[in-house]
Image (cartoon, rainbow, N blue to C red):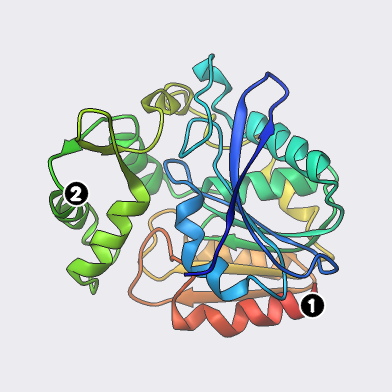
Amino acid sequence: MVAYEHCYWTSGDGLKLHYRLYAGDEGAPPVVCLPGLTRNARDYEGLAERLAGPRQVIAVDFRGRGKSEYARDPMTYVPATYVADVQALLAARGIGRFVAVGTSLGGIVTMLLAAAGAPIAAALLNDVGPEIDPAGITRIRGYVGKGSSCPTWMHAARTLAEANGDVYPDWTIEQWLAMAKRVYRLNSAGRIVLDYDLKIAEPFKVPGNEAAPDMWGALAALRTVPVLVVRGGRSDVLAPAVAERMAASLDRAELVTVPGVGHAPTLTEADVAAPIDRLLAQA
């Protein structure tokens, strides 16, 4: 396992927020990894271990996830606030140009950062676009914010496998166990519980809060930079036609579909390794 540091920054409203810092060449644009709605920095362990060294890798815990503090006001769990939080991180570390890697919600934040003028050298948008398939929204709204606990890690792994078997139909129990340790944490009572503030669901229940109004306009801010659009072949969030329109609207885009995977690819699949390397070579 590649070593990393636990680092922190402070949000505009005073929250202590966490990221993992994987060491690398400080002369190259760092890779800033932004996770999905209910996920955290641990989602990027595999990718960070492959990329760290030639570049720094920064894997973020959004507010209310992982080791970041929970928001005092749950209505701040919206994309605009996450954008402001990441801008504060970039300023705190003195980061100029960077490579943005965004999965699901993290991809929405990436597009909004670009629209706000962030100096993105290249971007990877993982299974998300300016339009989100209604089927995916319905499914996500059905589980986000619903607490669960398990007595052991193996119970947690089997719970994930039962709920997400359609997303990763070929996974082994070892892979589900590894995911459980990314998604859950051990609480003070010795139970395995979800590693996020269940109140993140409150604004997400309001139609329109899962994205900003003009997301195609936000995507257009990435028109001239290298962009890799990754889509899970079984995705119910990013429709094939939307992914193709995204790639066609950008000057330097590559579209890769990961077969047999739903929402979202882990970015450790063999199908995306070479495309990611090509993206970084252009940054």
Classify 163 as above or below 25: above
The disc labelled 2 sits on which kind of residue?
Answer: Ala
Number of the label disc, if any, that sits on residue 282: 1
Residue at 82% in and 69% down: 28
Q: Dot 2: few (<14), some (14–19), or many (≥20) neighbours within 10 Å?
A: many
> Which of pointers 1 and 2 indicates the residue nearer the eye?
2
For the residues labelled 1 and 2, the Cα–Cα distance comes to: 40 Å
Q: Dot 1: few (<14), some (14–19), or many (≥20) neighbours within 10 Å?
A: few
Looking at the image, residue 178 sits to the left or right of residue 94; the answer is: left
The disc labelled 1 sits on which kind of residue?
Answer: Gln
Instruction: Report x, y in % for residue 277.
Output: 65, 81
Which quadrant of the figure has residue 283?
bottom right
Residue at 53% in and 65% down: 241
Which quadrant of the figure has residue 14?
top right
Looking at the image, residue 40 sits to the left or right of residue 159; the answer is: right
Classify 85 as above or below 19: above
Secondary-structure class at tag 2: helix
Q: Nearer the viewer, residue 188 or 54?
A: 188
Number of the label disc, if any, that sits on residue 156: 2
Decide which of tag 1 and tag 2 comes sooner along the chain.
Answer: 2
Classify 224 as above or below 95: below
- Res. 34 in view: yes
Residue at 46% in and 29% down: 204
